[in-house]
Amino acid sequence: MNTRANTSAPAALDDIDRALLAALAEDARASVSELARQIGLSAPSTSERMRRLEAQGVIGGYTVRIDPRALGYTLQAIVRVKPLPGQLHLVEAMLRRIPEFIECDKVTGDDCFIARVYLHSIEQLDDILNKVTERAETSSAIVKSTPVPRRLPPLV
């Protein structure tokens, strides 16, 4: 998935572009003919719109959603990470190498990173955090539910 920041003006989207993006967000594996049917265009017109949205950087990639529970990950934790003085870049590199950290944001404020971790068990959390605590302070919270799952930003 393309994560580069788009520094140019935002792409102008019409109602059909928004419908196409919503359909792709729902099922990125849908065929062009199925997408065309959903948005009311021909398959060639739909393909052209997809190519244009890709060229504009609006569509940065196509992905699959995996249910972590199906892989035995029964818990999630949010971990706030505050590197010790002089350790910022080392901690960032370390977080990238630990596969249980499935996403991480560098943020402003007291903590430098906020990360999401998938866990098979609560005991696994200590094992993961022990890899980081030599270079950073951590604070974690177990996720009870996700009332707002990851979604598209408003398509205005």
Image (tube, helix red, strand yellow):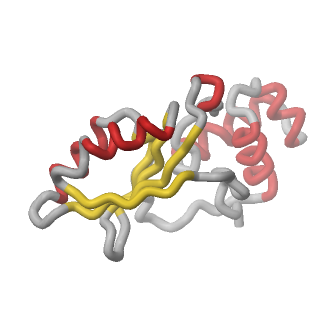
Q: Where residue 145 sits: x, y (%)? A: 68, 52
What residue is drawn where x is 64% and y is 51%?
150
Return the residue nearer the eye: 64 or 126: 126
Total numbered badges shown on the rendered structure: 0
What residue is drawn where x is 35% and y is 73%?
108
Farthest residue to the left: give it. 86
Return the residue nearer the eye: 30 or 143: 143
- Quarter of the picture containing the C terminus is bottom right
Image quarter of residue 123: top left
Give the vertical position of 58 relative to 84 (above or below). above
Q: Where residue 44 sits: x, y (%)? A: 75, 30
Give the vertical position of 29 relative to 7 (above or below). above
What residue is drawn where x is 30% and y is 41%?
96
Farthest residue to the front: give it. 123
Q: Decide if residue 98 is on the left or right side of residue 4.
A: left
Q: Decide if residue 141 is on the left or right side of residue 108.
A: right
Return the residue nearer the eye: 9 or 21: 21
Farthest residue to the bottom: give it. 109
Give the vertical position of 72 relative to 3 (above or below). above
Q: Where residue 87 sits: x, y (%)? A: 14, 58
Image quarter of residue 25: top right
Return the residue nearer the eye: 84 or 95: 84
Q: Where residue 144 sits: x, y (%)? A: 65, 52
What residue is drawn where x is 56% and y is 31%?
73
